[in-house]
Image (cartoon, helix red, strand yellow):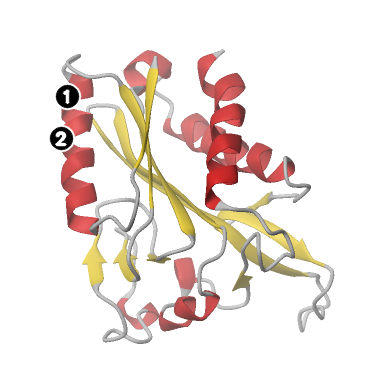
Amino acid sequence: MVEWKISDGLTDYDHAVDVMEARAEAIAKGEAEELIWLVEHPPLYTAGTSAKIQDLVEPDRFPVYQSKRGGQYTYHGPGQRVVYVMLDLNKRGKDIRAFVKKLEDWVIATLAEFNVTGEIRDGRVGVWVQRDDKPKTASGHPTEDKIAAIGIRLRKWVSFHGISINVEPDLSHFSGIVPCGITEHGVTSLVDLGLPVSIETLDMTLKETFKPLFEE
């Protein structure tokens, strides 16, 4: 069984990392159940292991945390659901690529419940939506905005860190970084797409779409 935990209010980032690392260690030792932990953070930027300092456009805007997850710079803040995923790949097949694909499928299945078509793009981490309501790019392609980020770390084949899905964050806060090192595309949220979805509704949907992918 996978335990689900929802933290109210805003969770300190360093505290979240400490909790994840301790739980991942306990899972690896067989002393704790796997865990999906749903949180919101105060406004902050995190730098993944591939982050480039030039992508931190406004270093004094919000606190910046060095993260050991994969990826580049990301923003976390109120109105964004962060899904910390502590799952044991020793039991789920030691295939990192397949695991990330399953996380992507989980986000896409969740967005589909709100009639949003999430898509994956080669060379661009995360989940994207096509914006037919926006002008095309300079190259004539449809504009695409990022709605969810994915970045994980493994220790003893137990995952931690995870997913962030934009429900109703302040999208202007993303301008202090180059999100995931990508300059030619923007960011969006469920509310920005015209969907008055609450975080509580998203949470229920995440749990429903999790089961067929990870528990059956």
Q: Is residue 101 visible?
A: no
Q: Amino acid at mark 2?
A: Ala
Residue 185, relative to residue 146: is it above or below? below
Q: Quadrant of residue 87?
A: top left
Residue under numbered circle 2 = 22
Q: Amino acid at mark 1?
A: Ala
Dot label at residue 42? none
Identify the residue shown where x is 32% and y is 60%: 48
Q: How many marks?
A: 2
Contact between marks 1 and 2 (CB within 8 A): the answer is yes
Q: Quadrant of residue 157?
A: top left
How many other residues sit within 10 Å of disc 2, few (<14), some (14-19) or many (≥20)? few
Dot label at residue 26? 1
Residue 161, relative to residue 179: is it above or below? above
Q: Position of residue 194 (x, y in %)?
A: 74, 65
Q: Is residue 214 visible?
A: yes
Left or right of 188, for residue 130: right
Q: In this orientation, which residue lies closer to the viewer: 187 or 167?
A: 167
Identify the residue shown where x is 60% and y is 59%: 147
